[in-house]
Image (spheres, rainbow, N blue to C red):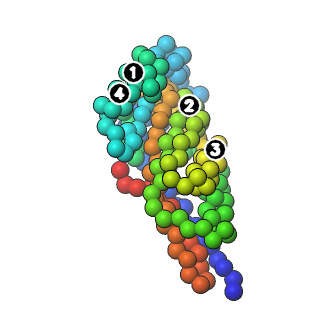
Amino acid sequence: MTMHSRIPLAALAATLLCAPAANAQAAESADAGPTCAERGMQRLAVMVPPGRTADDVRQLAQNGSLAPNGTEVFIVPAGHFTAMRDEAGYRSRMDRMMHRFLEDGGEVQGTASILLLLDENGAVTEIHPNTRNKRLDREMTRMWTGAAFEPYRVDGCRVRAWIHVPLTFSSDFGLTDRRIEVKTNQP
């Protein structure tokens, strides 16, 4: 019996690549314009994670837990992503990750929460998965390593950004077909 695997990723990639940014606009390229730090401003764009409020995020920033004291925080509404760079590399990493789960007979069901820190150039510099599964957390970290987005911009300068990417995984196994589908949750 031959096993086939289909991994539909279009829903995830389309959501990440096509959603508009609010309070922070995508730059044409990473080197278009200065960073806010180069202008002498400490700024950070933050997408509020589930279970938190914008006031919670601002308070974390004010007490120095989120960023150095004096950092100006700009709230990015949930689900508003700038364009992703190197979509082909990202898809390749996602395909490999999902294929490993399929090959190992793994099953993935439910929602995972991924928190990413982007630098002023849009590169992912920190990855904090929260899947409650150590193996899946390692795989998600590996998958997001090397990912990059167009930088977030505030008042014409590029800023670092914390973004929250909620993903829903569903596995479907049959006698002749194995599938894992990954979707972003609607904000």
Q: Nearer the viewer, mark 4 or mark 3?
A: 4
94 above or below 144? below
Disc 4: CA contacts within 10 A as few (<14), some (14-19) or many (>=20):
some
Q: Is residue 43 visible?
A: no
For disc 2, the marked residue is 119
Q: Nearer the viewer, mark 3 or mark 2?
A: 3
Callout 3 secondary element? loop
Q: Is residue 129 visible?
A: yes
**Relative depth, front residue between 144 and 24:** 144
Callout 1 secondary element? loop
Q: Amino acid at mark 2?
A: Asp
- Mark closer to the chain start, 1 or 3: 1
Choose top left, top right, bottom left or bottom right for residue 135.
Answer: bottom right
Q: Is there CB contact under 8 Å for labels 1 and 3? A: no
* 143 lies left or right of 11: right
For disc 4, the marked residue is 58
Q: Position of residue 78 (x, y in %)?
A: 37, 44
Callout 4 secondary element? helix
Give the CA distance from mark 1 to mark 2: 21 Å
**Residue lying at 49% horizontally and 42% vertically, measured from the top left:** 115
Of all residues, the one furthest to the bottom in this rendering is 1
